[in-house]
Image (cartoon, rainbow, N blue to C red):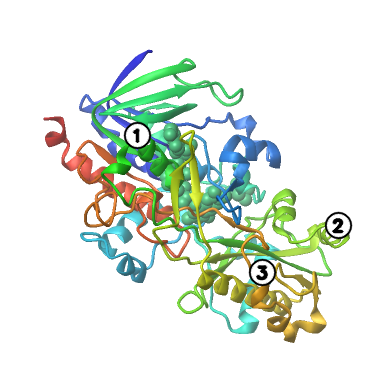
Amino acid sequence: MPERDADIVIIGSGAGGGAVASVLAPLVARGLRIVVLEWGAKLREEEYTGREVEMASRLYFDSGGTFTKDRSLTLAYGRAYGGSTVVYTGTSLTVPEQVIGRWAVPGLGFADVHARSLKYAAENNVHLLPEEDINDNNRLFLAGCRALGYHVEQFPLNLKGCRGSSLCNLGCPNRAKQGSHRVQLPRAEAAGVEVVTNCRVRRIGERLCEAVVANPGYGEPSAWEPGEYRVRAKVIVVCAGGAVNSPALLLRSGFGDRLPVLGRYLSLHPALILVGEHEQPISNFNGHPKSYYCDEFWERERFLLETCFYFPFVTAKNLIGFGAEHSELMRAFPRLQMILVLALDPALPDNRVRLDRSGEPVVDYTLTPQVLDSLHASMVASAKVFFAAGARRVHAPAGSRFFIDAADADRVAELIPRENVKPGKISITSAHLMGGCRMGRDATDSVTDSWGRVHGVPWLFVADSSLFPQCSEVNPYLTVMALADRVAEGITTRIGELLA
Ligand SMILES: Cc1cc2nc3c(=O)[nH]c(=O)nc-3n(C[C@H](O)[C@H](O)[C@H](O)COP(=O)(O)OP(=O)(O)OC[C@H]3O[C@@H](n4cnc5c(N)ncnc54)[C@H](O)[C@@H]3O)c2cc1C
Ligand code: SF4
């Protein structure tokens, strides 16, 4: 089996891995070899076609529909040069101070996370869209929330030259979205970091990664020929495979024995896609899809409402029912206003990543009664927003009827009974996967310390969304980058000691 040597091996090139690669890149000039091993492909520019099924299969694990074990949720997470940042929408929020307080990680302060988040907001050109670039779907949301007196804010977005094609979740075909594949990874490569795509790390031994390079039949060729490799990390390994694959990789590599918390405390921001039908067409296909969010229910009912736009297949999958009513609603697709709900879920030890018999990850996740309460309250609140924005009827997944007409707008709470909100009965998704290698004090409560150092394994670090001890309660990517930045700074500061 061919062997490769590097001083630092980074596994995964998403929000976390990209940030680590760019911060560590100056070490190349000091003579260190840094290699990023990325499972996914780097698409050629002309391969960003915007075709839903094709892009989903090339840029996501399981085409964006990985089931949890009990099949009550589907999980969407990216597999590509740039990880999920290739398919994320680019809404760029910094984590609130209360959340870092609730995390209570010894040594991790709000000011530090905030300053690092602002660094990446600046690097990724985060700004507010001008009024004229905001499309109907977003205007209707704003109008509906304001009419009800709900607090609503504009999303900062990380764009440069956005052409409003609304294809963000299928990979931006216009090079506008400033993900890690556009900013941090090219910068790291320019400084001499090597990125090996189509390269899956199967296992990590004592500073030794077992990896397989394959040719998926699309994208730029990998820097290495297809085959199996042993990659020796002379100094350290940084695991940045995301909240499912980092815990899975460490479990597969046998670290579970000394780290009882490994894989546990996963949170997912369980999400619903809700629709209201208007009389007139809505410009959902043009303009950036996500300009506003409503945090009226953040503290008490524990959910956020956000604008969104999903493509026909994803929308159809997320509606409840089938047959005539379902196709009637899908035929109204150009007239649908859409809202995305994020429930703010607790991190529980039994919500976790484990391995099946063949060593592949399985996600155990139970929706708690409180999360189901949040989802129920969010359906009622969203129906009110749709009607306040002028919708003629609303489809509520837990509604006692498929459609609720505007004439019944005052009865939405009654027509969406709480007892209908049951796991498996409504379509719930997640694109915010967090935890599994949580930071904390020691091996009894966590996998790493607040610098991403794995307890008791001096050569192993984690730098991705799996570090979150609980959910971020806002869209997470800037916080992932901030934590990865901190991990990389800790490595840089201690590099002399690590090399010794
Ligand atoms: C559709 C979608 C929309 C989103 N929108 C937003 C948004 O608007 N705002 C926001 O803040 N957040 C958003 N997110 C979430 C955000 O993208 C993630 O929180 C963030 O990218 C997670 O960073 P990460 O480094 O943990 O993992 P990722 O970015 O997912 O990167 C992990 C990478 O590691 C690779 N990998 C995994 N295992 C291995 C292995 N064994 N060997 C080699 N490589 C491996 C994967 O292929 C992947 O490329 C969205 C996510 C999705 C899916
Ligand atoms: S809306 Fe803007 S960022 Fe999104 S895919 Fe289109 S051009 Fe890219």
Residue where numbered disc 1 is placed: 253
| Left or right side of 131 for 282 | right
Q: Which kind of residue does numbered mark 3 sit on?
A: Arg
Assign a secondary structure to mark 3: helix
Is residue 217 or residue 260 the one in the foreground?
A: 260
Residue at position x 52%, y 30% in the image: 42
The disc label shown at residue 139, or none: 3
| Left or right side of 275 for 224 | left
Residue 145: image x %, image y %?
62, 77
In space, the residues marked 3 and 1 are separated at their CA atoms by: 50 Å
The disc label shown at residue 60, or none: none
Residue 249 visible, this angle = yes
Residue where numbered disc 2 is placed: 323
Mark 2 sits near ligand 1, with its Cβ under 8 Å away: no
Q: Which kind of residue does numbered mark 2 sit on?
A: Gly
In space, the residues marked 2 and 3 are separated at their CA atoms by: 32 Å
Is residue 164 or residue 326 the one in the foreground?
A: 326
Mark 3 sits near ligand 2, with its Cβ under 8 Å away: no
Residue at position x 22%, y 39% in the image: 457
